[in-house]
Amino acid sequence: MADILTIENLSNLLVLCFLQAVLGFDNLLYITIESQRAPIEHQKAVRFWGIIIAVLLRVVLLFTMIQLIDSMSEPFFVFDWTGVLEGGVNFATLVFILGGVFIIYTAVKEIGHMLTIDRLDTDVEHKRGKSAAQVIAVIVMMNLMFSFDSILSSLAITDVFPVLACAILASGFAMLVLADGVTKFLEKNRMYEVLGLFILLIVGVVLLGESGPAAAHAMHDDTLQIKVFGQAIIPMSKSTFYFAIIVLVAVEVVQSGYSRKLAAERSAASR
């Protein structure tokens, strides 16, 4: 125990908690939106058990990755179609591609649904489209896909399992505390659901970008970088990602304020 409670491990724990909080924002947003597809009376329980099960499985995934990190990093297929498709594919590549495609599909489908429904205030059937167990299963699966990026980033800081596990448990507790509040905010401010879906869309694109250099980073071999028509797939930087989110939020806030002001002026003029 004394070997674990060192200044280095404690400082690493603080850094990891901050990292998990930053990288966990998109995860929390997805959980909030997906939980609304369960029956209304079960949505709170779905968020609770979805997060609990996902966090426990994330700790198991972390332990497994620490034990199998070398074998998981080895590319099991290398594209060699010069000028068209080049690069290596390993386990991380598949996780990022599948996760990115699924998130983009979910966001586009939900945006399309918003444009086709007739009445927003009575759209109850849409929220009851899945059973509680189905929604929990989807949340757990996607939480693991989201966690892959954060676990890889965490392993770059330290490989001490107790420190990493504590950071994951702390992030899970934070999600439990914040999930209901985020859900209530979205229910009271329905226009921000669109904002959340577009943020998820960007998250999907970010995950697809992470798939490009996954095998190359793992094997420290630039020839394994995935290239399409000679152009390398480069991940979006975290600073660019959060700048895009800030811009989206700012546009939504300004537009909402302007719409309310415009509505008030029109109402006053009609009198």
Image (cartoon, grey):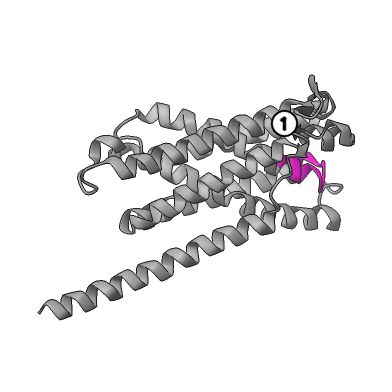
Picture coordinates of residue 177, whole percent (x, y): 48, 53
- Where does the magenta region start and end? 151-162
The kind of residue on which mark 1 rests is: Ala
Picture coordinates of residue 33, whole percent (x, y): 42, 44
Residue 270 in view, yes or no = yes
Q: Is residue 97 left or right of residue 118?
A: right
**Which residue is pictured at 45% across the width and 51% down the height?**
196
Which residue carries the number 1 mark? 92
Q: Residue furthest right?
A: 221
Q: Is residue 100 left or right of residue 123?
A: right
**Which residue is pictured at 46% across the width and 41% down the height?**
107
Picture coordinates of residue 48, whole percent (x, y): 45, 41
Find out whether residue 153 is within the magenta segment.
yes
Is label 1 in a helix, a strand or a loop? helix
**Which residue is pictured at 73% across the width and 26% down the height?**
91
The answer to which image quadrant residue 128 occupies is top left
Q: Residue furthest left?
A: 271
